[in-house]
Image (cartoon, rainbow, N blue to C red):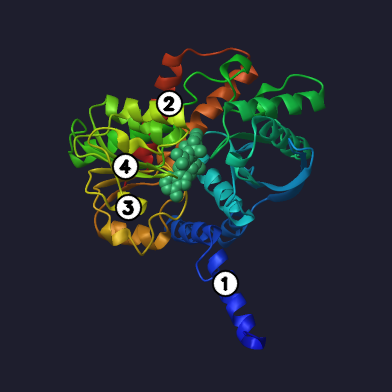
Amino acid sequence: MVTGAKKDKLYEEAIKEQFSMDRKSVFENALDQFNKAAEILELSEDQKAILRQPQRITEVSLPVRMDDSSIRVFKGYRVQHSKARGPAKGGVRFHHDVSLDEVKALAFWMTFKCAVVGIPMGGGKGGVICDPRDLSEGEMERLSRRYFAELSDMFGPDSDVPAPDVNTNPNVMGWFVDTYSMRKGGWYPGVVTGKPLEIGGSLGRITATAQGVTYCVQNAVNELGIELEGATVAIQGFGNAGSNAAVLLDELGAKVVAISDVEGAFVSDEGIDVTAAVDHVLKHRSLKGFDSHANVTKLDDAMKLLEWDVDILVPAALENQITEENADRVQAKVIAEAANGPCTPEADQILADKGIFMIPDILANAGGVTVSYFEWVQNRMGYYWDLERVKEDLKRYMDAAFESVLV
Ligand code: NAD
């Protein structure tokens, strides 16, 4: 029998492992990156002190009636990191791994992302601890509405404007805007972006993040003198950011040879049939079983996708995927961080030492927030742009941002 101090130690170790307490948190990683940048930019102590902490943090408990009539209480967060440049802007994530630490880091990065693309917005982020795979559509709707109602004093077109993130989509944004408008007794489309087109969404928003990633990749390969036509690509994560990046890069002639999602990683030397992969996910909700397609193999270890011998690697899933443990084995020439924080600061250093051309998240995935900003502008004008204008303006913003970040 295990008793006393030994029991305590085992318990402590189990907790440590479960919560990775011996590893740095995502927010600590974000602060490390900030400290390095602040040194280069010679920010004053006052500036650093203001930027190191979020402006406002709210935690809410969300009682939701489940389909079986029981009540389940979910935990949700909204963090406004900085509103110095305008209303807080940032998505809402529904995921079982959501934590306050993660939401703080994501809100922090949003402040700098908005500044990199030069839009008049600050940094915010939200999250709810849940696994949407366990929820029916009705439960998702009740949870989404409860979250927005509970936090409606924080949200507003002039104060905090959320958008989709992992596991939230235009439908969820529709529930958000409707909940807010019902409470305020009016119609406030500018309180949320990433809405369905019919209720004030912007053309080009769904593919905006991937489009921005693609513009950055085009600029990067031009810089390096690599031909995009025929260049090999690996993409981790096959949701909004990853799958659309696969489609756009494939359309430009790049050869997508590895893709993955939560169900595993799939590779093909001949090149993945991207249209078939997108159809597969539409039909089956994930890439599970995609290795039934000709010339496609499933990897035993999905993380090996990050080490695949490709020209371009697009991490488009979650944080902390490339760390000091695997960074040295990365073979890509260019990394485009479609996900937020996929590489730890320690990995960044190793990748830089290897001469890998890094397009950081606050630039690479800024296309999403840029078109969100266009959507917010259109909502406030009540005048809607055609797709051509959205794409042209996005390219102009992304190219200028790429140029300003390039060293
Ligand atoms: P999504 O929910 O549409 O897709 C996430 C994808 O990642 C899914 O295919 C999921 O199966 C996969 N995934 C989850 N865990 C994984 C794992 N361990 N290994 C491999 N794949 C895994 O989410 P999204 O909107 O595409 O967001 C992905 C990333 O891009 C996030 O970091 C998000 O913050 C970032 N991002 C998204 C947008 C946007 O507009 N959607 C904008 C900026 C940044």
Label 4: few (<14), some or many (≥20) within 10 Å? many
Q: Earlier in the sequence, mark 1 or mark 3?
A: 1
Q: In this figure, which residue is indicated by the disc labeled 3?
A: 300
Q: In this figure, which residue is indicated by the disc labeled 1?
A: 14
Residue 105 placed where, x, y %?
56, 52
Indicate the secondary structure of the residue bearing disc 1.
helix
Amino acid, disc 4: Phe
Marks 2 and 4 sit apart, C-alpha to C-alpha, by 31 Å
State the residue in front, 92 or 29. 92
Horizontal side of residue 391 vs 382, given as left or right: left
Q: Which of marks 3 and 2 is nearer the N terminus?
A: 3
39 over 187 or under it: above or below: below
Q: In this figure, which residue is indicated by the disc labeled 2?
A: 394
Q: Are marks 2 and 4 in contact (CB under 8 Å)?
A: no
Label 3: few (<14), some or many (≥20) within 10 Å? few
Hey, which quadrant is residue 2 in on the image? bottom right
Residue 267 placed where, x, y %?
27, 42
Amino acid, disc 3: Asp
Quadrant into which the N terminus falls: bottom right
Q: Do the residues labelled 3 and 2 touch (CB within 8 Å)?
A: no
Q: In this figure, which residue is indicated by the disc labeled 4?
A: 266
Marks 1 and 2 sit apart, C-alpha to C-alpha, by 47 Å
Indicate the secondary structure of the residue bearing disc 3.
loop
Q: Earlier in the sequence, mark 4 or mark 1?
A: 1
Q: Earlier in the sequence, mark 1 or mark 2?
A: 1
Amino acid, disc 1: Ala
Label 1: few (<14), some or many (≥20) within 10 Å? few
Indicate the secondary structure of the residue bearing disc 4.
strand
Q: Does the residue labelled 2 lie within 8 Å of ligand 1?
A: no
Marks 3 and 2 sit apart, C-alpha to C-alpha, by 39 Å
| Label 1 vs label 3, nearer the camera | 3
